[in-house]
Amino acid sequence: MDLFRSVRAIAGASESGDGRSEYVDWDAVTVAAKSATDAGSLELTPEDREGYAADVRDARARLRSVGGLDFDVPETIEVQNRHHWIDANVATFRRVMRPVESELQVAFPNATRVINTGSMTFVLSFLASHVLGQYDPLLLADGDIAVGSDGEADAAHSLFFVHPNIVDAAAELDVEYPRFRRWIAFHEVAHAAEFGAAPWLSEHLESRMEDGLETLASGGVDREAFRDLNVAMTAVEATPRC
């Protein structure tokens, strides 16, 4: 970790000087969050690699069988370190915040930029050290969905496992690492099953998110939209625990 570099990146966020309207310096967030966070080891043994792949395959097969569901998981399953996770989620936060940033007017843009950059750095640094796995349906993706090696657009979802966090959590909980990793895989693939079995869910979340962000950008708060989002995401997160 390099905390001095992290602070310097946040402090430099006020020096936009390039006509950008963003009220968060996302490049600075990336540098600062990585500098404040230990990347963690991503030295995977052959058993680790096969274990992740087998866990995802088994989870998909069993959920399809038990639930009678027809759903897909992303073709590429990413096993990441903490810095990889930060990269992926800076892109997500940047995409989601774009509608607000394009409309927001503030009295002191440089100071606001530094504060917002520091806040996002703290959030991403904290989450990067605690997130175990993540199913991302890529809401509000528009046209910036990743393109695969075959030149075709990847399906609008992705699946991440943060390997060093899984290893550390298993050790801290004093549980068998392979069994714990498998539980995380089943949990995240269950999210893929939820979105696959309910195609309307992504559209509903996107619609309510857009409503909330548009109102927020205009200076108001759409409490109903955010309440709907909270209820839906609570149900999504609670279901895989059953």
Image (cartoon, rainbow, N blue to C red):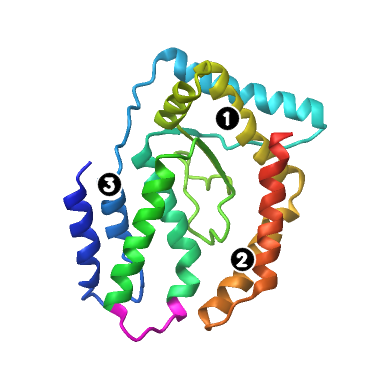
Q: Which comes before the other along the chain, label 3 or label 1?
A: 3
Q: Looking at numbered disc 1 in the image, what kind of residue is underneath it?
A: Ile
Looking at this view, name the residue that lies furthest to the front: 173
Magenta segment, which residues? 102-109
Q: Secondary structure at mark 3?
A: loop
Position of residue 114 measured from the top left corner of the image (x, y, whole percent): 28, 69
Q: Is residue 209 above or below residue 201?
A: below
Q: Along the horizontal axis of the image, is 63 left or right of 141?
A: right
- Residues at marks 3 and 1, CA–CA distance in whole angstroms: 26 Å
Numbered circles on residues, count: 3
Q: Which residue is mark 2?
A: 209
Q: Looking at numbered disc 2 in the image, what kind of residue is underneath it?
A: Met
Q: Secondary structure at mark 1?
A: helix
- Residues at marks 1 and 2, CA–CA distance in whole angstroms: 27 Å
Q: Which residue is mark 1?
A: 184
Residues 88 and 119: in front is: 119
Residues 50 and 111: in front is: 111
Q: Which residue is mark 3?
A: 36
Where is residue 48, by image quadrant? top left
Q: Quadrant of the N terminus?
A: top left
Position of residue 94 measured from the top left corner of the image (x, y, whole percent): 43, 61
Q: Residue at x 41, y 54 (%)?
A: 123
Q: Looking at numbered disc 3 in the image, what kind of residue is underneath it?
A: Ala
Looking at this view, name the residue that lies furthest to the top: 47
Looking at this view, name the residue that lies furthest to the bottom: 107
Q: Residue at x 61, y 66 (%)?
A: 209
Position of residue 44 measured from the top left corner of the image (x, y, whole percent): 38, 20
Q: Is residue 89 above or below residue 112?
A: above
- Labels 3, 1: front one: 3
Q: Which comes before the other along the chain, label 1 or label 2?
A: 1
